[in-house]
């Protein structure tokens, strides 16, 4: 998650646009931990059948020796410097199907690249065949039926631009450059979820190419198991080539932001915890710790300006003497810009901001001064009231979806950043077992099982049915669960 510039113009993180960094070299290979059940080919272009694949597709296929290979394999998080066996920029659904069939026949894992913004770098993988959906960017909006359909490689900014032109929107993340599919398939940590549910709750249909090469339509009454699984289960079940979203009217957001700094972070966290406990569905709230400027809090109310003003008074009173920076906004397709970087992340879904958690967070904030950042975004209202097992997305009930992150630009700063993130994540784990999978580092199977909670066994069964060889394992991996296995 990054803070929505338009929602809170007075309260943005420091400017992440760092000229030149985007062209900097990657420093190290990130560990990819997956249910690696099958051998993979080395990243070489000498595997004979790649010629067959190359001949059978319309899109561009890049091999290790191809011009443009190094540029094409680069993803947003430069901490991951991975070398796929081949990369197909698919031209159409048939290309996707052929590539999946190739991968299945040769037991090569598949990496899916949508918007390329995975924190864990999953859009690219060593020894895998990458299916790049960069040409799947078509957006259509049906204003009367309030439905938007997008290709599997569409960015949030392009979706929002099209829907806002029709006076409509659907809850999405705060950075316009992030892929719609990568975010939605994992659930979505979104602005507007209190009123409308989160991104996956508004996914009313999809087209997916499964590991057997079939092209399937999903939705209510259509492949219901898969439809349930892709609403939270990430890219584990196939390549999603089209997504259909329910749209809603745009409602203005009236916001107040408070700069707190480094003084009394525990007190500010306690105040934040009290304020969000009974937040109305219209509310949006976040607590942020910036490595340089310290803590800040923001809240917003979507709807009538007079009602909003009364609600914001509570926040002003709680954070006095911090000055309230007030603004009114509607969604901004560009959102906040967080430029390509090296970053380590972890996540936690905090249900109770009790004294122990406040203690962990306050200590982490001080120890992370100059190193790391934390963002605790309120998840409540409609998204929280949907039953836990209604979709694969497990973050139901009110909570604070927390992203812990630390960037570095010089290689020697990497270990300190990674250590702070790992220690902060570990300290929160006893209080927050569930987490948004898109905020996790490449994770061991137990962590994924824990993150999905009660939904994991059903996900594993569906995985076994549709992807028994775990071709789609370059992700926060759900391992196929066959009958009789624990
Ligand atoms: C700057 C930034 C801001 C962010 N802000 C938010 C936010 O506000 N809210 C939020 O919820 N998250 C946010 N995230 C996290 C984001 O949701 C994930 O990183 C997500 O995986 C990005 O999707 P992508 O398509 O861009 O990434 P990719 O790297 O292209 O894809 C990541 C993974 O998603 C799956 N995937 C992607 N496309 C498809 C597809 N078409 N079919 C099947 N599987 C697919 C695959 O498993 C793939 O490996 C942010 C990340 C960044 C870097």
Image: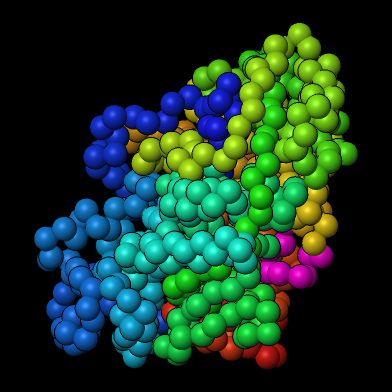
| Residue 389 pos. (x, y %) | 77, 70
Looking at the image, how many numbered discs can be counted on the residues? 0
* Main SS class of the magenta portion in the image: loop
| Residue 102 pos. (x, y %) | 31, 86
Q: Is residue 124 visible?
A: yes
Q: Nearer the viewer, residue 366 or 2?
A: 2
Q: Is residue 363 visible?
A: no
Q: Nearer the viewer, residue 170 or 57?
A: 170
| Residue 117 pos. (x, y %) | 43, 51
Q: Is residue 170 left or right of residue 151?
A: right
Q: Nearer the viewer, residue 383 or 85?
A: 383
Magenta-drawn stretch contains 10: no
Q: Residue at x 16, y 58 (%)?
A: 68
Quadrant in which residue 428 is drawn? top right
Q: Residue at x 57, y 60 (%)?
A: 143
Specify start and end residues of the magenta stretch as a single range.
387-395
Q: Which residue lies most toward the top here?
A: 321
Q: Is residue 132 left or right of residue 293?
A: left
Tell me the quarter of the image containing the C terminus: bottom right
* 358 lies above or below 391: above
Q: Residue at x 61, y 63 (%)?
A: 144
Q: Residue at x 88, y 39 (%)?
A: 278
Tell me the quarter of the image containing the N terminus: top right
Q: Is residue 7 left or right of residue 44?
A: right
Q: Is residue 452 left or right of residue 422?
A: right
| Residue 382 pos. (x, y %) | 78, 54
Q: Which residue lies most toward the front here?
A: 144
């Amino acid at each position: 998650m990054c803070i929505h510039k338009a929602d809170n113009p007075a309260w943005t993180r420091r400017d992440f646009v760092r000229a030149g960094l985007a062209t900097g070299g990657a420093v190290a290979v990130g560990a990819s931990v997956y249910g690696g059940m099958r051998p993979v080919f080395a990243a070489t272009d000498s595997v004979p059948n790649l010629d067959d694949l190359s001949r059978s597709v319309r899109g561009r296929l890049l091999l290790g020796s191809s011009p443009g290979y190094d540029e094409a394999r680069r993803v947003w998080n430069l901490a991951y410097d991975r070398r796929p066996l081949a990369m197909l920029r698919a031209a159409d659904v048939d290309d996707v199907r052929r590539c999946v069939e190739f991968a299945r026949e040769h037991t090569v894992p598949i990496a899916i690249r949508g918007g390329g913004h995975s924190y864990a770098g999953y859009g690219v993988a060593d020894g895998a065949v990458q299916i790049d959906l960069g040409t799947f960017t078509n957006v259509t909006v049906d204003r009367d039926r309030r439905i938007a359909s997008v290709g599997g490689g569409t960015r949030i900014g392009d979706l929002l631009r099209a829907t806002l032109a029709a006076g409509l929107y659907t809850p999405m993340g705060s950075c316009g450059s992030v892929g719609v599919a990568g975010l939605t398939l994992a659930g979505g940590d979104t602005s507007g979820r209190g009123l409308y549910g989160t991104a996956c709750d508004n996914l009313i249909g999809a087209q997916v190419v499964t590991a057997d090469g079939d092209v399937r339509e999903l939705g209510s009454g259509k492949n219901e198991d898969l439809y349930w699984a892709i609403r939270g289960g990430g890219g584990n079940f196939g390549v999603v080539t089209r997504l259909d979203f329910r749209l809603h009217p745009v409602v203005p957001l009236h916001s107040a932001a408070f700069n707190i700094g480094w003084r009394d972070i525990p007190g500010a966290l306690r105040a934040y915890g009290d304020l969000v406990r009974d937040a109305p569905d219209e509310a949006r709230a976040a607590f942020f710790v910036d490595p340089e400027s310290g803590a800040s809090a923001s809240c917003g109310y979507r709807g009538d300006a007079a009602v909003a003003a009364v609600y914001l008074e509570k926040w002003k009173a709680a954070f006095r003497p911090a000055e309230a920076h007030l603004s009114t906004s509607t969604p901004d397709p560009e959102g906040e810009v967080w430029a390509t970087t090296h970053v380590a992340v972890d996540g936690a879904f905090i249900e109770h901001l009790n004294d122990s958690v406040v203690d962990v967070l306050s200590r982490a904030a001080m120890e992370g001064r100059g190193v790391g950042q934390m963002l605790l975004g309120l998840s409540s209202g409609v998204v929280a009231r949907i039953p836990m097992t209604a979709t694969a997305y497990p973050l139901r009930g009110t909570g604070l979806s927390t992203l812990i992150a630390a960037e570095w630009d010089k290689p020697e700063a990497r270990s300190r950043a990674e250590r702070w993130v790992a220690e902060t994540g570990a300290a929160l784990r006893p209080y927050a077992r569930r987490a948004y999978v898109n905020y996790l580092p490449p994770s061991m199977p137990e962590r994924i099982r824990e993150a999905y909670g009660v939904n994991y066994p059903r996900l594993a069964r569906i995985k076994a049915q549709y992807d028994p060889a775990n071709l789609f394992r370059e992700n926060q991996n759900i391992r196929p669960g066959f009958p009789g296995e624990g």
